[in-house]
């Protein structure tokens, strides 16, 4: 797809064709001046990224579910799409709220800022998917295979990941209040500066998990082995909710009294 035409002229530093449109990247190629050519150039980028370019693949919300489907900004809420193959699809800004995607394949899908509120992704394949800044209030990921997926800055309060494989997942700066992470594989996952208040980690595997800067108020770690986590401070541990069965990392002390609330 050629993202820029003759009207852009010297306003573009680069006129190489691109296979997919990254609006921020393409705008960076424009020389941001007040000239007419610069303005036309920027408008051309906007048109391409909204799917109005005359060449290349355009997003069509009426397309049937399939690998590499282009559903950016589409409303697919309250649909039944369980078991479908949406691998490598573009689902950024899509509304998938309350949709049944149980058992669906979404490996390496691009889901930036998608709405997954109350969506069922039970037993889905999300390996390598990009879910940066998704809205996922009460979303269900139970049993999902999401190894190496990205949930950076995602809003996932009260979501459920019971028995999911989240090995190597990036939850940096994500909102995970009251999330259920019971019996999950979290080895190598990052929760840097994430909100884990009242999150449930019972029975989870946490080897190499990064907790630097995470908010751990009443994070439920009763009986959990924390000995392999990285970046956990004494102050974070003191406000979590553990018990005598909680294994503490070397260099930290078990709180004299856990601040647990029934």
Image (spheres, rainbow, N blue to C red):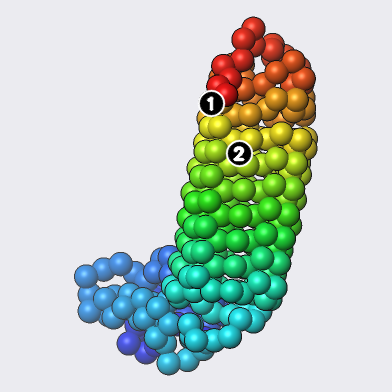
Earlier in the chain: of badge 2 and badge 1, it is 2
Residue 3: where, in percent of width, then height? 45, 82
Q: On the rendered structure, is 241 left or right of 222?
A: left
Secondary element type, mark 2: loop
Above/below status of 246 relative to 38: above
- Res. 182 image quadrant: top right
Q: Nearer the viewer, residue 78 or 10?
A: 78
Secondary element type, mark 1: loop
Above/below status of 185 relative to 58: above
Above/below status of 142 relative to 96: above
Above/below status of 51 relative to 151: below
Q: On the rendered structure, is 4 left or right of 99?
A: left
Q: Quadrant of the C terminus?
A: top right
Q: Residue at x 39, y 69 (%)?
A: 27
Q: Residue at x 68, y 69 (%)?
A: 104
Which class describes the residues within 10 Å of circle 1: few (<14), some (14-19), or many (20+)? many
Q: Check if mark 2's residue and mark 1's residue have beta carbons within 8 Å.
A: no
Q: Nearer the viewer, residue 252 or 218?
A: 218
Residue 6: where, in percent of width, then height? 37, 89
| Furthest-bottom residue in this view | 54
Residue 164: where, in percent of width, then height? 72, 50
Q: Nearer the viewer, mark 2 or mark 1?
A: 1
Q: Which residue has dot 1 on it? A: 217
Q: Which residue has dot 2 on it? A: 191
| Furthest-front residue in this view | 262
Q: On the rendered structure, is 227 left or right of 84?
A: right
Residue 191: where, in percent of width, then height? 61, 38
């Amino acid at each position: 797809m050629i993202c820029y035409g003759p009207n852009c002229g010297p306003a573009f530093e680069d006129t190489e064709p691109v296979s997919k449109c990254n609006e921020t990247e393409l705008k960076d190629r424009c020389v941001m001046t007040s000239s007419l050519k610069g303005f036309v150039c920027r408008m051309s980028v906007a048109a391409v990224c909204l799917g109005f370019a005359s060449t290349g693949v355009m997003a069509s919300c009426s397309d049937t579910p399939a690998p590499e489907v282009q559903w950016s900004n589409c409303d697919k809420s309250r649909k039944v799409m369980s078991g479908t193959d949406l691998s490598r699809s573009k689902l950024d800004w899509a509304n998938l709220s309350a949709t049944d995607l149980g058992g669906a394949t979404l490996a390496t899908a691009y889901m930036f800022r998608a709405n997954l509120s109350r969506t069922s992704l039970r037993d889905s394949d999300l390996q390598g998917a990009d879910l940066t800044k998704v809205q996922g209030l009460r979303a269900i990921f139970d049993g999902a295979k999401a190894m190496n997926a990205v949930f950076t800055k995602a809003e996932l309060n009260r979501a459920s990941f019971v028995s999911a494989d989240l090995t190597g997942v990036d939850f940096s700066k994500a909102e995970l209040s009251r999330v259920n992470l019971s019996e999950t594989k979290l080895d190598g996952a990052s929760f840097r500066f994430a909100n884990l208040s009242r999150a449930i980690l019972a029975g989870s595997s946490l080897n190499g998990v990064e907790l630097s800067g995470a908010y751990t108020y009443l994070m439920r770690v009763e009986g959990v082995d924390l000995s392999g986590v990285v970046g956990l401070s004494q102050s974070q541990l003191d406000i979590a909710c553990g018990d005598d069965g909680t294994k503490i990392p070397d260099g930290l002390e078990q709180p004299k009294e856990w601040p647990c609330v029934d």
